[in-house]
Image: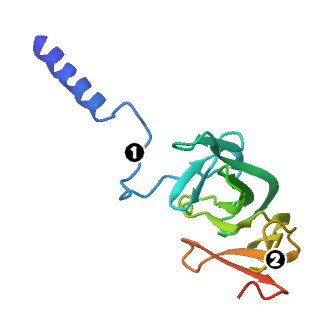
Amino acid sequence: MKTKLAVLSVAVLFLTACGGGSTEAAPEATNDVPVVIQNPADPANAGFYIDGIVYTLVNGALEQPIEDSETNNVFKLLEFKSSGDINADGTDDTAVVLINDAGGSGTFYYLGILTSGPAPIIENTTFLGDRIEIKGISFVDGKFEVVYLDRDSETSFAAEPTIEITGIAELDESKTSFNFSCRDTAGICL
């Protein structure tokens, strides 16, 4: 009886140490690839990969203290949102616009895309511009398009943006990253 109890105790310890109490598979090692939470149905609580860092919003915002500063680094989801199946897996994906205000003079705008399916795309954002004006976002011909007003390189940021630009996001052929481009009538997008 003591032998059976000892063997059972060792088995319980072994299973507990190895995670035997869980029915979910452990995530595979990814060689330091960041984990980005992507739920296209809930962009207000998702991760966005910007400049090599994943920023995870909670209820549509994230506020972080800036070292040696009294201001905060603030990310906020705007009301612009569109859905469409960009990765052709039968489930809608979501594109949103978010801003980043780090307390300086600029307000930086990003297009973020949250994909469905087993392999979400990690690098899911692109920079649109500084102090621009978003007009709308849509899903057209298998691509997300965001229309916004910007300035040419000679115009001061103090001036209102007046040049209409359409930013375009489409999935590459391997379905592992996005290709971002834009079009306008003023020659800003080359």
Rendered image quadrant of residue 134 = bottom right
- Does the image show residue 152? yes
Q: Is residue 27 left or right of residue 64?
A: left
Give the labeled residue for mark 2: 165
Kind of residue indicated by mark 2: Ile
Give the labeled residue for mark 1: 26
Kind of residue indicated by mark 1: Ala
- Label 1 CA crowd tier, 10 Å (few <14, some 14–19, many 20+): few
Give the x, y percent position of residue 81. Answer: 80, 57
Quick one: quadrant of the C terminus?
A: bottom right
Rendered image quadrant of residue 133 = bottom right
What is the secondary structure assignment of the residue under circle 1?
loop
The residue nearer to you, when weighing 138 against 69, is: 69
Circles 1 and 2, Cβ within 8 Å, touching? The answer is: no
What is the secondary structure assignment of the residue under circle 2?
strand
- Label 2 CA crowd tier, 10 Å (few <14, some 14–19, many 20+): many
